[in-house]
Amino acid sequence: MSHHRSKPSDATHLGLKEVEHALPAAWYYDPAQYANEMQGIWQKSWLYVCHASALAEPLSYRTMEIGDQNIVVIRGSDGRLRGFHNACRHRGSILCTEREGKLSSKLMVCPYHQWSYAADDGRLVRTTSFAEPAGFEKADYPLFPVAVGEWRGCIFIHLDPDAAWSPERTFNRTPENMKNYPLEDLVVGHTWRTVMDCNWKTFWENFNECLHCPNIHPELGDLVPLFQRRIVNFRDEPGWEADVGSEDPKRSGGLKKGAETWSMDYSAQGKVFENLSEEDHARGYTYATSLPSVFVGAYPDHIRAVRLLPLGPEQTELVSEWLFLPETLNAPDYDIRNVVDFGILVMQQDIDACDLNQRGLHAAPLKQGVLMPEEYYVKSFQDWVRRKLSG
């Protein structure tokens, strides 16, 4: 698993040195390839569900579909998180029909034939037949479990119930830069859900390069001047040594002078996290990624978790959660739209670009694309896909 970092340790030019071919174009629309990836990647990886604050109440639950696998994650009456296949052991009906909700009792009741399961451990509590046949034991028919892991208030699941939770191995881009951010104390202030007309890999590749930034993201380029140069790190260009020690954010990175965060007016409205270091403020933003399902962006006043779920070879659901301190959300002078609208603006620009990219991949003569020197993170991602599929 790749562990590329926002500040690579080798003090060299970061760009690719030779021609690298991209993944086969058909991998972005072929149904058989999609099935391979659902089985070989999505059903064998830790996947982000939501922030724990969205499941704070006992008996609250979330459902999510990973391909044809429907999963429910529930907070038990004992406060513990558990995950199950959202399927009745009787004849297979879905149990929890809503995307999210709260049980009215400690039982999950099948809406079809009313078999009831204990929310705390998934055991079958009762059936509705007048009698149970010889040899039938309720203990033999609990819900099928899935593994649940939690990192700093971020909930993940794995379809293998025996999967060992390890944040160190789950994150491809390490969250070490987030140690000063109060992630556990935050709550979801806004959720945005949309469907993209692109393969899930198309979105990740766009996320991993900035060659598109000047023409696709003019507002973001104004906020983060380095992005105007089509790069994500000042060491992406040959001759980068000349920029060492520069105070100009267009040469060194970080936010433009006077800007505080990713928002429409670049201000944090006086709500900056308290324990951030000078380096955190100078950086202005930092990311952690857990492929294939989520990236977490940390900014001086909020955190944004963006989750992907494939809906088909050429459709992907995107769910973005904006996380704030409760006192920030409750402050009468705080306008959450200042942050949310900027995030949506940038993501919608990316989505529109990904949709264009997806449509063009069908060109009959196009067997595969080619990567440019600045796209070393794209190559890391594509290498990760190849490794996962080769087992």
Image (cartoon, helix red, strand yellow):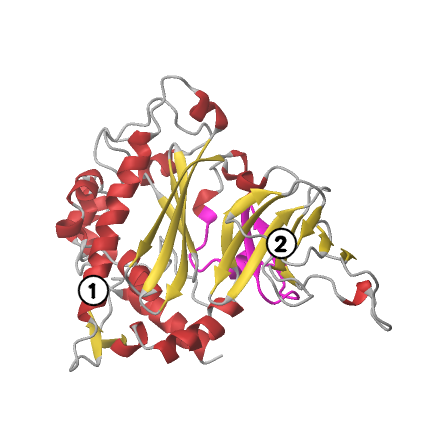
Q: Earlier in the sequence, mark 2 or mark 1?
A: 2
Residue 343 falls left or right of residue 130: left
- Residue farthest toward the top in the current orientation of the protein: 332
Task: Look at the picture and state if 240 lies above or below 334.
Answer: below
Please name whichever residue, 237 or 290, is drawn nearer the observer in this view of the structure: 290
The magenta stretch spans residue 375: no
Q: Give the residue type that dot 1 points to.
A: Asn
Mark number displayed over residue 107? none
Q: Is residue 372 visible?
A: no
Secondary structure of the residue carrying numbered label 2: loop
Count of labels in the image: 2
Badge 2, how many Cα within 10 Å: few under 14, some, many 20+? some
- Residue 132 x %, y %: 83, 66
Badge 1, how many Cα within 10 Å: few under 14, some, many 20+? some
Circles 2 and 1: CB atoms closer than 8 Å: no
Mark number displayed over residue 357? 1
Secondary structure of the residue carrying numbered label 1: helix
Gap between marks 2 and 1, in whole Å?
A: 42 Å
Residue at horizontal 29 percent and vertical 30 percent from the top: 338
Task: Look at the picture and state if 368 lies above or below 107.
Answer: below
Query: Where, by quadrant of the figure, is residue 19 drawn?
Result: bottom left
**Disc 2: which residue:** 111
Residue 181 falls left or right of residue 18: right
Magenta segment, which residues? 147-176
- Residue 334 x %, y %: 36, 22
- Residue farthest toward the left in the current orientation of the protein: 215
Residue at horizontal 50 percent and vertical 56 percent from the top: 64
Residue 373 falls left or right of residue 185: left
Please name whichever residue, 337 or 10, is drawn nearer the observer in this view of the structure: 337
- Residue 320 x %, y %: 39, 46
Query: Where, by quadrant of the figure, is residue 277 drawn?
Result: top left
Q: Give the residue type that dot 2 points to.
A: Pro
